[in-house]
Amino acid sequence: MTAPAPLARTSAEPAPPARRGRRPDAVAALAGALLVAVAAVVGTAIQNAGGTLHVAWPPLLAAWFPHAGPGTPAAVAVAAGAVVHGPALAGRLSWRSLTLTVWGAATAWIWSLALVDGWQRGVANRLTNRNEYLSVIDRFAHIGPTLRGFDQHILIGHPHNWPAHVAGHPPGATLTFVWLDRIGLGGGGWAGTWCIMVGGSAAVAVLVALRALTSERTARRAAPFLVLAPAAVWIGTSADGYFAAVAAWAVALLALSATRAVRRPALVALSAGLLFGWALYLSYGLALFAVPAVAVLLLARSARPLAPALSGVALVALAFTLAGFDWWEAYGLLVERYYQGVGGDRPQSYWVWGNLACAVIITGLASVAGLRRAGAAVPGAARRWYGGRDDAADRLGILVLTVLLALLAADLSGMSKAETERIWIPFALWLLPAAALLPGADRRRWLTLQAVLALLVNHLLLTTW
């Protein structure tokens, strides 16, 4: 068994010039905040003029509604604890204890933010409205025939067409809640609990992948930022947190296999492929995770996991295909359905950059500053990687920028106009570790900004998701 690659230089060694400089960090964060402000002002003007954005508080699908709730004290307590004690605990705990603590703290953060809106509004009713998955549970009484006829109900003009979220995703998303219902965990409360508990584990998956691909020290530096993710506002209120966790664990298992950090790498690679395959049948957009998957293999300098991983993907695809669901045909129909609805009305000229403002909100200003450092270091990192002299910071920068590339591809596709505060959660979680590139002395300040952003959004706005 080969251990994950260690960090190449000690803490006493200076960072390359591209990674130094607090003023550029502050400028990058200010630019991110300015982008959000401009998106809000311009978006409000466009919405008031013609209503074509179809969101009440651009760039978010939300409404202005200052409020507090039963989750408020807990959210403030979790945030304060993570800011004050998070960095020290991340450096001191054993690895196993750290992973459990990250899961517990991330889940507590998600729960507390969701409960700011109360149990019914914040958790139990989120997945039960007419556009959500639970509204069609009764139509899956016979799963086989439903899958075979699934694509016949995607277009709006067809009788009994699927509601927006069911039509907008492959059937794996709805099947998850059908199966929960079958085992006695039906209703919005159990569905919300499932998404929160599984979604909270995504932080651990990213942590595991970072340790395998970069170094344990880098993973520990990123841990508090993974806990206080601003995206937690939406992880607890939509199924996309669950989707994000599946994709994150697929990448993590692939990283463990590629770096030979497990006893049976081929079996782990197969498991990664099965999760990648399942992710494809949860959300069409998760096909873009092929980009970070390739980055994992390049960073690990190994193609050995490729065959078993692709076999896992093929097994899932074969199962759905034999059951009668054609992924490609359904996706083609979804594109048509997308432009039948508000997607055809929303202007890409605004959302192509308005979406990026949403990305700033769900990743936070610390991630923006960290991405600035990663981007500035690209030329040197690429040369060092090519020469086999790359270090943990290089590999972290390459990983987060690769995920950013996948996110930009989603943006340019025109299939992500608005609502990306939840749709892009799977990508956002992999941008959070960029904050590990920031100076250790500034870590608590950046963590405070992350926490304050999430608390303000959750208490000043009533989010739809």
Image (tube, rainbow, N blue to C red):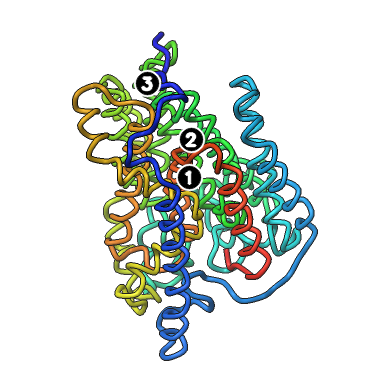
Q: Which disc is residue 206 wearing?
A: 2
Three-letter amino acid code at the position of disc 2:
Val
Mark 3 or 1, which is nearer the eye? Answer: 3
Secondary structure of the residue carrying tag 2 is helix
- In this view of the protein, can residue 326 be seen by the observer? no
Secondary structure of the residue carrying tag 1 is helix
Q: Position of residue 76 (x, y in %)?
A: 73, 53
In the image, residue 117 sits, relative to residue 394, either above or below, namely below
- Does the CB distance between marks 1 and 2 fall below 8 Å? yes
Q: Position of residue 465 (x, y in %)?
A: 57, 63
Q: Which disc is residue 300 wearing?
A: none
Crowd rating for badge 2 (residues with CA inside 10 Å; few <14, some 14–19, many 20+): many
- In this view of the protein, can residue 402 be seen by the observer? yes
Q: Residue furthest top?
A: 1
Residue bearing mark 3: 8
Whichever of callouts 3 and 2 sits on the residue coming sooner in the sequence is 3
Mark 3 or 2, which is nearer the eye? Answer: 3
Left or right, 108 with respect to 27, comes to right
Question: Which residue does the image show at 78% across and 63% down from the upper left?
Answer: 69
Left or right, 101 with respect to 11, comes to right
**Pick the front one: 402 or 167:** 402
Q: Position of residue 53 (x, y in %)?
A: 42, 79
Question: Which residue does the image show at 39% across and 11% down from the upper left?
Answer: 2
Question: Which residue does the image show at 47% across and 71% down from the upper left?
Answer: 59
Crowd rating for badge 1 (residues with CA inside 10 Å; few <14, some 14–19, many 20+): many
Mark 1 or 2, which is nearer the eye? Answer: 1
Q: Which disc is residue 432 wearing?
A: 1
The quarter of the rendered structure image containing the N terminus is top left
Left or right, 109 with respect to 416, comes to right
Report how far apart the C-alphas of labels 1 and 2 lie in the structure.
9 Å
Three-letter amino acid code at the position of disc 1:
Leu
